[in-house]
Amino acid sequence: MNAGTTNGILLLSRLLLAGCFLPPAIARLTNISGFAAALTMKGVPYGDIVATMIVVAEIVAPLALILGIAPRATASALIAALVITTGALHRFWDYGGLTRQGEQAIFLANLGVLSGLLFYMLVGPGAWSWQSWVGGIGAKKPAKKKRQSRPRAAKPKPAPARPMPMDDEDEYADAA
């Protein structure tokens, strides 16, 4: 696959992931008190503060996702928001019948979105991103040319050790 195709697929993936977050975030923004009440009823402490943080993350982070700005921070914020909302609001094991099936489908879909965010965190935004165009962190920079060293003369090898000849007479025996 050539670089253009790869970067196009990465851009499409970023747009699709952002599309998973923006519409529900805008709906939550229009009724943030209802979202906070739902979180509080499900046992999330400080539901109003958590709801505000989630809505801000789900509006700002997808915009950064579309532009390809700060991929790790963006993915981390969306993963945190997704884990909290999925764990609190889509507890399919608490239900039965059709409600259970619906909540389980949403729960599993959110796991798929989570896997997409993990891939984005690992792979990054690609060359068709604001980060790459501005030349910021993670942009492809030309490799430094390696400075060649001058050739060195070969080091002389040490002479092999010769065994000392053994005389029949011991020189030191005569001295004693």
Image: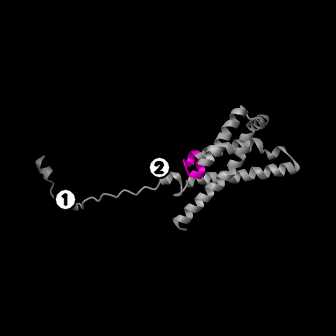
Q: Distance between the residues labelled 2 and 1?
A: 69 Å
- Characterize the magenta stretch by its predominant secondary structure: helix
Q: Mark 1 points at which residue?
A: 164
Figure quadrant of residue 41: top right
Q: Nearer the viewer, mark 2 or mark 1?
A: 2
Figure quadrant of residue 148: bottom left
Q: Which residue is drawn at 78% across and 44% down?
A: 91
Residue closest to the far bottom: 1
Give the mark count: 2
Residue closest to the far front: 30
Decide if residue 104 is on the left or right side of residue 69.
right
In this rendering, is residue 2 above or below 104?
below
Q: Is mark 1 on a helix, strand or loop?
A: loop
Magenta span contains residue 165? no
Decide if residue 135 is on the left or right side of residue 17.
left
Q: Name the residue under label 2.
A: 136
The reply to whether dot 2 and dot 1 touch (C-beta < 8 Å) is no
- Location of the N terminus by quadrant is bottom right
Q: Answer few, some or many: residues within 10 Å of disc 2's Cα (few below 14, many 20 plus, some between 14 and 19).
A: few
Q: Sequence order check: which comes first, mark 2 or mark 1?
A: 2
Magenta span contains residue 69? yes
Residue closest to the far right: 97
Q: Answer few, some or many: residues within 10 Å of disc 1's Cα (few below 14, many 20 plus, some between 14 and 19).
A: few
Decide if residue 51 is on the left or right side of residue 137.
right
What's drawn in magenta, residue-wise? 64-73
Camera-side residue of 168 and 104: 104
